[in-house]
């Protein structure tokens, strides 16, 4: 019986080795059949990884250059080289630099409004205590201080005794907003009205 068990064991071992070799041959055939496709996909993945890395590096370098140029503009608003660097690397900082330059040169408000129009409109609406202007600003999707405009609108409405409208306006401020904490305090105050 032990001889029979040994023979079965050897058969099983040979079958497993045969299956392994058969699998290896299948993989080899597959590789030979699709060799160019496999190498092409591998090369494409490598090229994309390199391109992504280079792009990320260039963006970081542009940020560094833009920040250095902006620092120079803050120290000397008339630095033309730094202004040109900002224009090439970061349009947003370039616009802020032009605003600072116009402010330094005491140019008219029109020049300032050209670059930071919405912020200037927001400031004017607060100064005039204009509910309509604040409402119009809060309707713009890309306005930087949208939630603060809504909050100030609600505050002005509450001061005029229009409590329902103020509560409705405050409900437009999302919980993720920095103005949400202020709006909660105002809502709490409006509960008594």
Image (cartoon, rainbow, N blue to C red):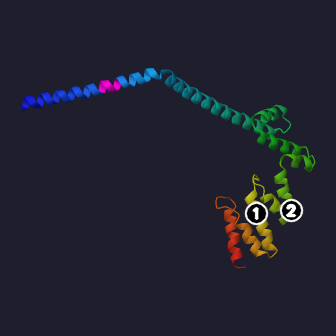
Q: In the image as oriented, which residue stretches furthest toward the bottom?
A: 192
Q: Residues within 10 Å of mark 1 (few under 14, many from 20)?
A: many
**As rendered, which of 99 and 160 lies closer to the eye?**
160
> Which residue is depicted at the point 84% across and 64% down?
132
- Is 7 on the left or on the right of 33, as rendered? left
Main SS type for the magenta part?
Answer: helix
Question: Quick one: SS at disc 1?
Answer: helix
Percent across and percent down for residue 9 are 16, 30
Image quarter where the N terminus lies is top left
Q: Position of residue 124 (x, y in %)?
A: 86, 58
Is 131 on the left-hand or right-hand side of 151? right
Depth check: give the residue in front, 170 or 113.
170
Q: Which mark is residue 183?
A: none
Residue at the disc numbered 2: 127
The image quadrant of residue 21 is top left
CA gap between label 1 and label 2 equals 15 Å
Magenta residues span 20-24
Q: Nearer the viewer, residue 82 or 170?
A: 170
Looking at the rendering, which quadrant does residue 8 occupy?
Answer: top left
Which numbered mark, 1 or 2, is in the foreground of this view?
A: 1
Q: Position of residue 5 (x, y in %)?
A: 11, 31
Tell me the residue that label 1 is attached to: 150
Determine whether, in the image, residue 1 is placed left or right of residue 54.
left
The residue drawn where x is 78% and y is 73% is 158
**At x 18% / y 27%, what residue is drawn?**
11
């Amino acid at each position: 019986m032990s001889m029979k068990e040994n023979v079965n064991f050897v058969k099983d071992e040979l079958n497993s080795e045969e299956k392994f070799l058969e699998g290896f041959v299948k993989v080899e055939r597959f590789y030979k059949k699709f060799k160019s496709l496999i190498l092409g996909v591998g090369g494409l993945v490598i090229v994309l990884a390199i391109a992504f890395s280079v792009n990320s590096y260039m963006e970081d370098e542009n940020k560094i250059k833009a920040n250095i140029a902006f620092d120079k503009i803050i120290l000397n608003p008339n630095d033309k080289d730094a202004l040109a660097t900002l224009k090439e690397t970061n349009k947003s900082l370039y616009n802020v630099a032009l605003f600072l330059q116009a402010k330094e040169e005491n140019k008219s408000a029109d020049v300032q409004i050209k670059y930071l129009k919405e912020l200037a409109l927001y400031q004017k609406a607060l100064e005039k205590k204009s509910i309509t202007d604040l409402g119009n600003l809060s309707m713009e999707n890309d306005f930087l201080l949208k939630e603060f405009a809504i909050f100030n609108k609600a505050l002005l409405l509450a001061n005029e005794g229009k409590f329902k409208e103020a509560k409705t306006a405050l409900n437009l401020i999302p919980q993720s907003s920095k103005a949400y904490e202020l709006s909660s305090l105002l809502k709490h105050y409006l509960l008594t009205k």
